[in-house]
Image (cartoon, grey):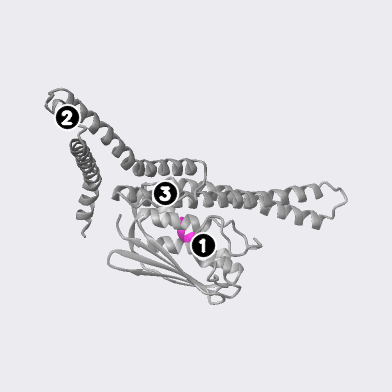
Amino acid sequence: MSKLSTRLFNRISLPFYFSISIFFIFLITVVITGLLFYLAQVFGLLNEEIAQDGIVLPVVILMACTIIGTTISAITSKKMLKSIRMFIEATDRLAGGDFSMRLLLKSPPEFKILSENFNRMAEELGGIEILRSDFVNNFSHEFKTPIVSIKGFAEILKHDDLPKEERDEYLDIIIEESARLASLASNVLELSKIETQMILTNKQRFNVGEQLRQCVLLLAAKLEKKNLSIKVNVQDDHISGNKELINQVWLNLLDNAIKFTPENGIIEVGMKRNEDTIDILFRDNGSGISAEALPRIFDKFYQQDTSHSTAGNGLGLAIVSKIIHLHAGTIVCDSKPLQGTSFIISIPIGL
């Protein structure tokens, strides 16, 4: 059945269902009333005077039809009212926070569609609630840890007999943790801004190849610090988008590659033009990502390193994913433990 036929069927099915129901109620009412009057005549309960009376007989028939019709209507509507009560109860439970509630209404077709839509809504709300809970828990952890660290080392620095070397070491830790807090606040605000952005603004056409080369130069100091080699194979090509947001994507991915690549490792940045898109590749020969962690790398605050010993707050890839999807693009990660990680970003040439 085509989509148009299905849509047309769904539109007429409920009115048709009610029309058939009313028709059968009238039919059954007439049949039962006729049968009762026939039996009354057979058993002599209906004499000729009543049968020939122009007022009494119609009144008796009307009363009989009303009583019988009302009874049949009450019985047949009980099932439909039961479905409506089930829906009301389900919405009450859903409003109360029970996202496990599901409906299994089968007929009429509209009720089945209503049931499916309700179940999908409950599932989505349940997922959002889990994400919200995880976000609050993870944010609390990421926010509390540096504050506790800063407070502890600040208390130690109050001691006058502390050697200068230790004092400098603790001050460096406080500075590092303060920078981590500032980065966390900045990333949360940036992610919040991007998530609420439905339409891409400040679009312009720019040279993405030149932008990639500039990002490599910006992080040259980090590359030299770990003695990393980088192979850049990009050409001058233009795309349309938000230049500032796209720049964040390249910096995040390149910074991640530097962070997780061991000393003397190799990082590769590549570029390929297709008919309607441009593919950008970031590849490293670092520690890689486990199969269990791979599906969650774009989740907010998720970090494969549960000890949080690696610098970061788990928001970088979430921001990258949001920006890429805002540009109608795609991002794919391919990684295996101890075999490195590859990110391939595909962005439309024109938006």
Amino acid type, label 3 = Met
Q: Is residue 123 above or below residue 18?
A: below
Q: Quadrant of residue 87?
A: top left
Residue identified by numbered label 2: 47
Amino acid type, label 2 = Asn
The secondary structure type at the circle numbered 2 is loop
Q: CA distance from mark 2 to mark 3?
A: 64 Å
Which labelled disc corresponds to residue 296? Answer: 1
Residue identified by numbered label 3: 121
Judge from the rendering whether residue 15 lies leftward or rightward of residue 260; answer left or right. Answer: left
Q: Nearer the viewer, mark 2 or mark 3?
A: 2
Q: Quadrant of residue 262?
A: bottom right
Magenta residues, start to end: 248-253
Which of disc 3 and disc 2 is earlier in sequence? Answer: 2
Give the image location of residue 89, x and y in percent.
45, 42
Which of disc 2 and disc 1 is earlier in sequence? Answer: 2
Give the image location of residue 114, x and y in percent.
35, 47
Give the image location of residue 151, x and y in percent.
74, 47
Residue at 53% across, 77% down? 339
Judge from the rendering whether residue 60 lies leftward or rightward of residue 84; answer left or right. Answer: left
Amino acid type, label 1 = Arg
Give the image location of residue 350, x and y in percent.
29, 57
User: Which of the two residues, 9 or 20, is positioned nearer the viewer here?
Assistant: 20
Q: Is residue 229 above or below residue 215?
A: below
Q: Residue furthest right?
A: 161
The secondary structure type at the circle numbered 3 is helix
Which labelled disc corresponds to residue 23? Answer: none
Q: Nearer the viewer, mark 1 or mark 3?
A: 3
Which of disc 3 and disc 1 is earlier in sequence? Answer: 3
The crowd level at tag 3 (other Cα within 10 Å; few <14, some 14-19, many 20+) is: some
